[in-house]
Image (cartoon, rainbow, N blue to C red):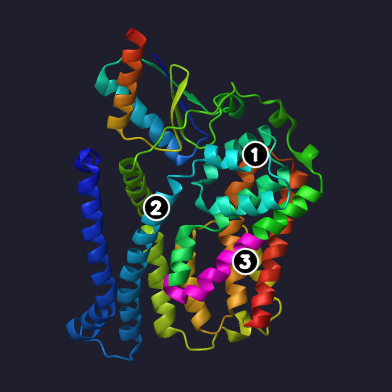
Amino acid sequence: MKIKVLGVGCANCKLLLERVKEAIRDSGVQAEIEYITDMKEIMKFNVMSMPGLVINDKVVSTGKVLSKEEIISKIMTAKAGEEQ
Amino acid sequence: MKKQIKSSLATKLFTIAVLIIVWFLAYNYLPLFAKWLSFDVFKLKQGSHLGEAIYFFLYDTPKVFLLLILVVFGVGIIRSFFTPERTRKLLQGRKEFIGNIIAAGLGIVTPFCTCSAVPLFIGFVEVGIPLGVTFSFLISAPMINEVALVLLFGLFGWKVAVLYLITGLLIAIISGIIIGRMKLEHEVEDWVYEIRSNGGDAEISNMTWSDRIDFAVDSVKNIVGNVWLYIIIGLAIGAIIHGYVPENLLAGIMGKKAWWSVPLAVVIGVPMYSNAAGIIPIVQALLEKGASLGTVLAFMMAVIGLSLPETIILRKVLKPKLIAIFISIVATGILIIGYLFNLIL
């Protein structure tokens, strides 16, 4: 699974990145995390509010610092999608 | 909090109804409570410097927080309807003028933080929204925010809050129109125009009412969590000024007759970075001691509306010339508003 956190270095973006790391640790899912700050990369996802969360190239959340539980549930949904 | 996410809509609505009743009771009995606490419990003398300062602080602090929670919650519900994606759709294909008016209005209700200024700018330009219309949005979004409005309402009354809202909108609309007319498209960094997103909007999930309530509760936690300390410090300084600084001390420096006070307020205000929360209580105390309203409003608008961090972020997409034009036009608007209020009030 590939997870990308889109952010421009603001406090909320870093907070989301930390929570994603925790979520992966807690859920035990194998995942690659990438923190993207390059504006050109970010705009490829057509996201206008920071931070953004992308799982397997699909934007699952924008403009919100999700809680760890919410992130885990998004990861699980994506995982179920992978296995199908 | 976990429980609340899982609870049903009915429970949430019931909780909100109860909280609203508690809110009104608290708001109504607050003056009595603050009096009782300062003059009966602490046994301070009514009319003494210390007594007045403490009473002012004990009354204003809970009042501001009560107002803040109510308004941020209400605005949170409204904002759950306006994602940046939806706002962009509403602005797409709009002509100058009407577009500027709508953009300035949407600037108030669309969730916005400084860190999203660049992606928003690119996202708008990419779908062909005119530069001037985009600027109307970018000016109004930070300048007119609910925290500023609540504090103005709570500390100065509704007239000043409405004046701030209207003049803020006017600055955003007119500055946007002027920037649009100047044909400055080539002053945007070239790479912005090269960006092509993968097409299609990022998925806009449909929110249920239960989600909207959660969204509003979250925004209360976030916003109040971010500004509470500034508000308390601001109110404490305000209380000291209120109790100890003699009346009319500031009339000479910040009053109507000092013509240079407005430009000075703008020059000091622009590089300052503060949210409205910390600055307004201090400003109120200054006003009480003889500073004039126009000067004070100009100062506030300069502090919140034109912030150094935002311009630094925008530099990524705007060439220096456009940044300079943007700052000068908005600053001029603020100057005019400042003088106008000093003249008519």
Amino acid at circle 2: Ile
**Numbered circle sitting on residue B14:** none
Going 43% across and 51% down the picture, which residue do you hit?
B78
Q: Nearer the viewer, residue B88 or B179?
A: B88
How far apart, in angstroms, are the residues tagged by discs 2 and 1? 30 Å
How far apart, in angstroms, are the residues tagged by discs 3 and 1? 25 Å
Is residue A74 shown left or right of residue B204? left
In this figure, what is the number of numbered marks? Answer: 3
The answer to whether tags 3 and 2 share a subunit is: yes
| Secondary structure at numbered mark 1 | loop
How far apart, in angstroms, are the residues tagged by discs 3 and 2? 24 Å
Q: Nearer the viewer, residue B249 or B95?
A: B95
- Start and end of the magenta stretch? B154-170
**Numbered circle sitting on residue B167:** 3
Rate crowding at label 2 as few (under 14), some (14 to 19) or many (20 or more) other CA atoms within 10 Å.
some
Q: Where, quadrant-wise, is the N terminus of chain A in this rendering?
A: top left
| Secondary structure at numbered mark 2 | helix
Amino acid at circle 3: Thr
Amino acid at circle 1: Gln
**Numbered circle sitting on residue B92:** 1
Looking at the image, can residue A56 be seen?
A: yes
| Secondary structure at numbered mark 3 | helix
Is residue B88 shown left or right of residue A27? right
Vertical comparison of B81 with B285: above or below: above
Q: Chain of mark 1?
A: B
